[in-house]
Amino acid sequence: MNDIKILIISVSVAFVANLIITPLIIFLSRRFHWYDHINDRKIHEGQIPRLGGVGIFLSFIIGFFIAFFLSSEIRTGSSNISLIQFLTINAAFVIIFAVGLLDDFTNISARYKLIAQIIAAGSLVAVGFHFRTLYIPFFNIDVNLGFTSYIITFFWFIGICNSVNLIDGMDGLAGGTSFFSLLFLGILSAVTGDVAVAFLAFILMGAILGFLVFNFPPAKIFMGDCGSLFLGITLAAIPLIGNTSTGSKTLLISITILMIPIIDTLAAIIRRTIIKRVHFFNPDREHLHHKLLDLGFSVKKILALIYSTLILLGLTTLIWAKFDTNWSVYLILASWVIVVGLYNLLSFFHRKHLKKANQKSE
């Protein structure tokens, strides 16, 4: 059986498995009252189950094991992953998922979630998952990051893990963002020969798609912290698992594909720690989707806008990976400038909107 058939089977299994698992989770959640907590930052009403991440996690494992047993390419490891790396990355995924699941049930302190992320990130970096070089556009040179590669990658893992968690505030948003990010990470891996990494990305896509059937607005279930944190650590790790996929361009390509959650997280850091001078983990209602909602966009229009942006960013990375020319670099830089500029423009109009709203209420 060739890899294409195995891929179709394993992705389909992950998708169908979650179509079966998620309704069961919804039933159990209603039976035992496992609902998402409602507060002034949440935009949903009513009692919605919050354990959709369990379905994503379990269906992903099922799909991956199907692929593992059917494909000799995956068993031999096209990415040259050692046994210790394989065990470490699986342990990191389980730790992050378990801490997220615990938080969904007991609402643990952000400090303990951060400790788990530090352990997972530190372990992954220690066994060799880190950005080793950085490609400098126009000069066509690769800069060896040296010891700083460990520091950069450590914060990369923690940053992306939290960015998906922070963007998980609206029906279909975190799941859809992860879906399209994985789509382009999978395609890049496939066209550059990292078959095992491509399988990993596409199987997780299948699991997420099964979840989105029930999470697309109006959502019947949310993924919870177990889902958002697991997707975050996976999205951070996938670009680093493949040693040959995009080489020194890996960091810039990864940033581009994940630019939406990255910008939203950086804005939250600046807003909370520098402007408001509060702890980063103090929640607020000023994320990207909150701003668009305040300006009158519907949930479906927000999803269409963000999904379209993710697709365009992903396409620019494919073009850059395929055509290593100055014009493709200009395209990447233009995409960064446009997205950052539009985000700042949105923030400007949102501030004006809040100012007018406050004046009317006085």
Image (cartoon, helix red, strand yellow):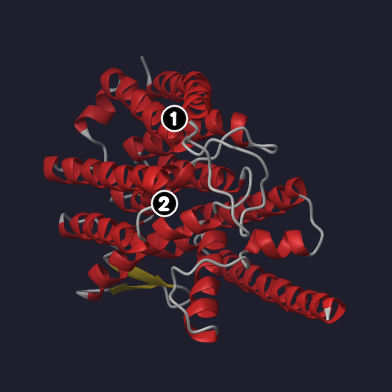
Mark 1, residue position? 55
Mark 1: few, some, or many residues within 10 Å (few <14, many ≥20)? many
Q: 185 above or below 126?
A: above
Mark linked to residue 44: none
Q: 32 above or below 104?
A: above
Residue at 47%, 44% in the rendered image: 224
Residue 20 rendering spot, x and y as whole percentages: 49, 18
Residue 361 rendering spot, x and y as whole percentages: 83, 76
Q: Amino acid at mark 1?
A: Gly
Residue at 55%, 85% in the rendered image: 275
Residue at 23%, 68% in the rendered image: 150
Image position of 336 (left or right of 308): left
> Considering only order in the chain, which callout, 2 or 1, is on the residue closer to the N terminus?
1
Mark linked to residue 232: 2
SS for dot 2: helix
Tell which of 178 and 165 is nearer to you: 165
In 3D space, how far apart are the residues under numbered discs 1 and 2 (Cα atoms)? 16 Å
Q: Can see residue 195? A: yes
Q: Can see residue 249? A: no
SS for dot 1: helix
Q: Amino acid at mark 2?
A: Gly
* Discs 1/2, front: 1
Tell which of 114 and 66 is nearer to you: 114
Image position of 314 (left or right of 361): left
Image position of 205 (left or right of 133): right
